Amino acid sequence: MPRLLDRLLGRGVKPPIRSSLKIPLRGRYDGAQTTDDNRRHWAAADALSAGAAAVPGVRRTLRMRSRYEVANNAYARGVVSTLANDTIGTGVRLQMATPDGDANNLIEEVFSEWAQAVCLASKLRTMRMAKTQDGEVFGILTSNPRLPTDIKLDLRLIEADQVANPWTVATMRSMSDGIEFDAWGNPIGYWVLRHHPGDLFTMGAYESDLVPAEAVIHYFRTDRPGQLRGIPEITPALGLFAQLRRYTSAVLAAAEVAADQSLVIYTDAPANGESDAMVPMDTIELEKRMATVMPGGWKLGQAKAEQPTTTYGDFKHEILNEIGRCLNMPLNVVLANSSSYNYASGRLDHQVYFKSIRVEQAAIEHVILERVFAAWFAEAVLIEGLLPQSLRRVDAKPSHQWFWDGQEHVDPMKEATAQGERLLNHTTTLAEEYAKRGKDWEAEIRQAGVEAALLKELDLAVPTRLAPAPAGAPGD
């Protein structure tokens, strides 16, 4: 009985002997296997870090090839410019959200005048194109005394080639291709070449200036942790652009050869048969609309025009569809042609495209516009009489937001009907609906009130929603 209790309570019972021999667990992934079939396919795969994979020489080669394709390929040029136009549109507008309505209107008006003076919309489009084509772009917040506005802040754009390690400064561990970092990885300065290294006949092309990080905007996409410089967004499509141009040139050359007056003299007679002797590889000149007599036993034939083939258009569409995928751009936007689309497919493809544009606009607000507005406001508060006295504090950070151009709907009537239903069931607001169109809802409502008052003053009919036609009316 005691032994039974000891066993139940675990007293005096020796633990079981466990073997020290570990049984290995083997997990297999098909992608990790190296076979004769995939050895060559992944021959260029490496384990480099983000910085080592995008060293200055690699980025320079990618930039040169990307610029070449954009300069010489109509589709590449169209893709880059369309993406910039759809992202930036006619420009971004500032809307203040402080309790003082008059102060909001004044700040918005002064900022709009300054933005037009420095061509802010045009510079934003250039920066978006440079990010797609070069991978990155730098903007320096500087002072321009020749601006016609009271605020002399300006945004000077420089290409990625001009930010590089200076020759006069030894390369340190805290420096990465022209950018110096502190112990926490924050940029503290940028070495900017005084002249572009690609300029011709420029003396002292490699003289550099250290610009503090507070005055530099670095706009690029981070694809990997630890990535400090950008690579062109169309990098995965560079080979596809080259294939597209080579295939088009080959098809065109074949079609031109077949279309020219290329004739062949041949004979059906066997070797050493009954046919007149002719000099091999000899040529005969023929004139237009003239018949000729061939030597005995010889015939005159023409090459068949087999190019372009019926698959030429399908090949181009597949290549362009793959090119647009790395930019989240649907095929009809790449082609600038929606003849093969219906309403549903066009709208569905555009949803992904417009969502990526909204993500990019949010990145532009965070990286560029907020920095620009902070510098603009810091200078504006120092100018006497420019801003309301309630906002003239150096530490002030007035509430605001940015408005972009709205995306036009494929079917405006359907969108207007859906918009009216959303407003009726209170699932949206006027502010939200006007924001989708890139407009300030307060300014639009005030304008509507002014127009309604003027219509009433002039005794004109106020536009109202048309009532549905009764059943059985003409036209049913």
Image (tube, rainbow, N blue to C red):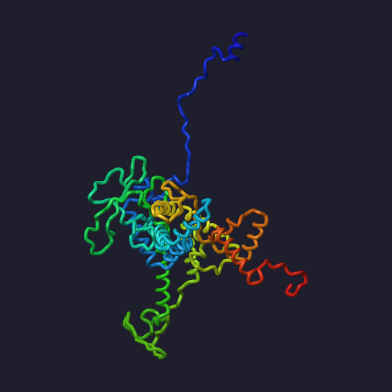
Residue found 44% across the figure and 64% down from its top:
81
Q: Is 390 located above or below residue 119 in the figure?
A: above
Side of 368 relative to 15 (left or right): left
Answer yes or no: is residue 8 visible.
yes
Between 212 and 113, the one nearer to me in the picture: 113
Between 144 and 217, the one nearer to me in the picture: 144
Side of 409 relative to 187 (left or right): right
Between 304 and 72, the one nearer to me in the picture: 72
Q: Quadrant of residue 239?
A: bottom left
Side of 33 relative to 425 (left or right): left
Q: Quadrant of residue 225?
A: top left
Q: From this viewpoint, which residue is outermost toward the top?
A: 2
Q: Position of residue 71 (x, y in %)?
A: 37, 66
Q: Is 34 located above or below residue 201 in the figure?
A: above
Residue found 46% across the figure and 74% down from its top:
306
Q: Position of residue 80 (x, y in %)?
A: 43, 63
